[in-house]
Amino acid sequence: MMVAMTDMLIGVVLRYVGTWVSAALDLPSVRFFWVEEIGEYALAWLTFIGAAIGIRRGTHFAVTIVVDRFPPPWRRAVFAGHYALLVAFGALVAIYGWQVSELNSQSFSPALDLNLRWLYMSAVVGGILIVVYSLAALGDVWHGRDGTPGARH
């Protein structure tokens, strides 16, 4: 998060202040071609890791008004199904993320000349974390601990 915020701040300063100073003092223009790519990488990693952490902490939005009225065994079944679907989703993200990272392993970013595999590996890492955290939550439901989405803090 700090990398993305610092990158955006530097981009704004370079774009408006740096450009103005270089024009006012008749200096060569400030090159800030790298700002967008760093922001893109930081956002991708932040999104996937943040989604996985949100699953573990139970902070994703959930409407349980109907499920709360179910008897406890049914409620457990719904939550178990919920986390099983999340395990499948995380596995799909990781598998297809790996395939996309392999397809782009010979491509490089234009400004920083970084291998694009690092950008797409964020999906692989995020998918694996989603699987791990969803399995942990599924274990909580299985053992009778509160597996309600949003219950963990």
Image: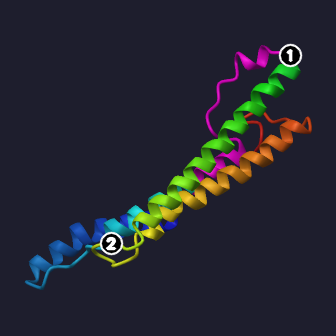
User: Is residue 137 depicted above or below 25 in this figure?
Assistant: above
Circle 2 packing at 10 Å, graded few (<14), some (14-19), many (20+), is few
- The residue drawn where x is 17% and y is 73% is 19
145 drawn magenta: no
- The way the protein has been coloured in the rendering is rainbow
Query: How far across and how far down the image is residue 64, in percent?
Result: 70, 23
Q: Earlier in the sequence, mark 1 or mark 2?
A: 1
Label 1–label 2 contact, CB within 8 A: no
125 above or below 19? above
- Which quadrant is home to the C terminus? top right
Q: Residue 51 lies in magenta, yes or no?
A: yes
In 3D space, how far apart are the residues under numbered discs 1 and 2 (Cα atoms)? 54 Å
Residue 71: which numbered mark, if any? 1
Mark 2: amino acid: Ser
Q: Quadrant of residue 61?
A: top right
Residue 13 vs residue 32, the one in the foreground: 32
Which residue sits at x=73%, y=50%? 133
Q: Residue at x 60, y 53 (%)?
A: 127
Q: Mark 1 packing: few (<14 Cα in 10 Å), some, or many (20+)? A: few
The one nearer the camera, 139 or 56, is 139
Q: Which percent across, then down, holds residue 109?
A: 33, 72
Q: Position of residue 52 (x, y in %)?
A: 64, 51
Residue 55 sits above or below residue 39 on the image: above
- The kind of residue on which mark 1 rests is Pro
The numbered dot on residue 109 is 2
In the image, residue 41 above or below residue 84: below
Stretch of the chain drawn in magenta? 49-71
